[in-house]
Image (cartoon, grey):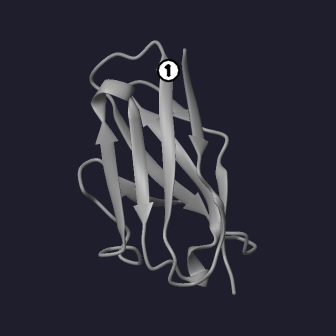
Amino acid sequence: QVQVVESGGGLVQPGESLRLSCTASGSIFSPYTMEWHRQAPAPGKERELVAGLNANYADSVKGRFAIIKDNAKNTVYLQMNNLKPEDTAVYYCLYRTPRFLYWGQGTQVTVSS
């Protein structure tokens, strides 16, 4: 079993920065990857991939967001710069193995003036 815990969300103003953290613990075995997804509050809005460790980013965040991995801590960070109101969402961390998916509980990011 793997536990995934996110932290670092909050309320920020447009143009500001925020760093999210995600730590996996428990039965950690390679190979695995970790990703950041988000789900906006709009009705019908589906969860979308924001950033993965293969340097794949959603078009809407390219040049503003960066995913950073700390192997020693089984932790990934999502550095978010120049935040926009449309970045408002619950951000989820996904720990992915060839057979299983483990989601964190999510952390709220709100960008508003």
With respect to residue 14, does 63 lie above or below? above
- Asked where in the image residue 90 lies, by quadrant, the reply is bottom right
Q: How many marks?
A: 1
Query: Left or right: 44 with respect to 48?
Result: right
Give the SS element for disc 1.
strand
Query: In the image, is residue 102 above or below residue 77?
Result: above
Residue at point 71%, 70% (across, down): 44
Residue 25: tell me if it is visible.
yes
* Residue 28: image location, x then y, percent: 40, 17
Q: Position of residue 54 (x, y in %)?
A: 23, 50
Residue 47: in sight, yes or no? no
Q: Amino acid at mark 1?
A: Ser
Identify which residue is drawn at 56% across, 31% down. 4
Q: Residue at x 72, y 75 (%)?
A: 42
* Nearer the observer, 79 or 62: 79
Q: Is residue 18 left or right of residue 74?
A: right
Which percent across, then down, holds residue 83? 51, 77
Q: Nearer the viewer, residue 103 or 45?
A: 103
Q: Residue 41: x, y in percent?
A: 73, 70
The image quadrant where one finds the N terminus is top right
Q: Is residue 49 above or below residue 53?
A: below
The residue that mark 1 highlights is 25
In the depicted structure, whether residue 28 falls above or below residue 37: above
Q: Quadrant of residue 12?
A: bottom right
Taking the spot 50% from the left edge, 20% from the top edge, the residue there is: 25
Which quadrant of the rendered structure holds the C terminus?
bottom right
Pick out the residue farthest to the right: 43
* Label 1 Cα neighbours within 10 Å, binned few <14 / some 14-19 / many ≥20: few
